[in-house]
Each structure stands twice: as C-alpha cells, then as structure tokens.
Amino acid sequence: FLIYLLFYPFSNSNELKQKKELREYQWARITFGICLILFVLFAGTAVGIYQFFGSISNTMSDYAFVCGTIGSVLNLFFWLPQIHRTFRDKHPGALSITMLILLLLVIAFTTYFEISSKLQPTIWGSHLFTAAQLLILALMGIYFTQLKKRTNRLEVLKHILNESSPIP
C-alpha cells in the first residue's frame, strides 16, 4: 500500500488521467495518514498505560477491551470499499479469487477454534462479518470474470459469423 502511495503518481505518465483516479488516490493518501496517526496514538497510549499501571491492571484490561471493540467494529467495514469498487466497475480488477477463498478457509478455521474455545462473541463475531464480505467479493469476482469470458466469446463468434457471411 505504501508503494502504491509513493509511486502511483509516476505510473504511465506524470499526470493522473482521470478525475476518479485522482480522487481515489487522494482519498487513499488521507486515509493512510489518518490510520498512521491513530496507530501512533493508540500504541502510545498503550505504552503509557503499561508504564504507569502495569500489564495486569484493570486500566490495561479496560483499554485492551476498548481497542478490541473498536477493531471489531472497524473490521465490519473492512472489505466494503473493495465490494463497492468491484460492483461499480463490474470487473474484479486485480482480485485473486484463490486468495479470497483461502482467506475464507482461514477465517472459518480461526472462528471455529475461537467458538470451541468458548471465547466471547466480541472476539469471533467480527470474523463472521468479514467472511460474509469475502464471500460476496469472491462471488462477485467469479461472476464478473465469467461474464467477461462469455462476452468475449460472443464477440469472437459475432466476428466469425460476420466474416463468413457471403458478400452480396
């Protein structure tokens, strides 16, 4: 992601060709900056709590619970931008369907382990939403890939039929 932020403006040309690409690039830069600031803030707070109260204190446990809850809520929306872009473009882009399916398997095994270990639903619940989003994304990717193949075959068939028709 960092490489994308650094080198995207220099790819293909010095100017970004479309307004949509420029807007998406700017949005990615702003989001990355905000995430970096939040990471430093949360990590710094954790270090401060550890230094003043120790690792076994109630304050540290409460802070860890708040961070985990925030992470779970943010995890609910993790794949939504990619789902939106795939649906908008009607094309899977650079998505790897194999990677999505493998990630679904990892989430399934991890969630099964967490449920069987009787962990709290706040821990494993967000994985179910992530799995649902990954499943939607994988199905969209498969659908749009097949649709593109079908469209390409129809265009080739039309081209062959047009060339083989007799000239009047």
Image (cartoon, helix red, strand yellow):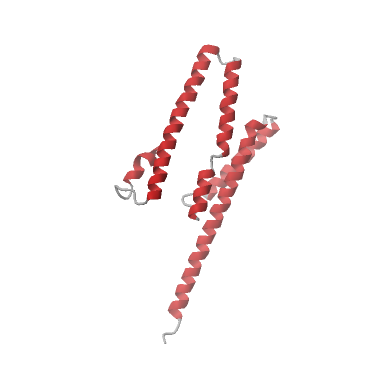
Q: Residue at x 56, y 31 (%)?
A: 71
State the residue lying farthest toward the left: 14
State the residue lying farthest toward the top: 52
Q: Residue at x 47, y 21 (%)?
A: 44
State the residue lying farthest toward the bottom: 168
Of 1 and 26, the residue lying toward us = 26
Of 92 and 16, the residue lying toward us = 16
Marker count (numbered) = 0
Vertical side of 17 occupied by 130: above or below: above
Q: Would you identify the image quadrant in which residue 3 lies?
A: top left
Q: Would you identify the image quadrant in which residue 102 lies?
A: top right
The N terminus, quarter of image: top left
Q: Is residue 139 left or right of residue 115?
A: left
Q: Residue at x 30, y 49 (%)?
A: 13
The C terminus, quarter of image: bottom left
Of 144 and 29, the residue lying toward us = 29
| Image coordinates for residue 7, horizontal then vertical, percent | 34, 42
| Image coordinates for residue 163, horizontal then vertical, percent | 43, 78
| Image coordinates for residue 159, horizontal then vertical, percent | 45, 73
Vertical side of 145 occupied by 129: above or below: above
Q: Residue at x 54, y 39 (%)?
A: 78
Vertical side of 114 occupied by 50: above or below: above
| Image coordinates for residue 135, horizontal then vertical, percent | 60, 47
Q: Is residue 14 left or right of residue 157?
A: left
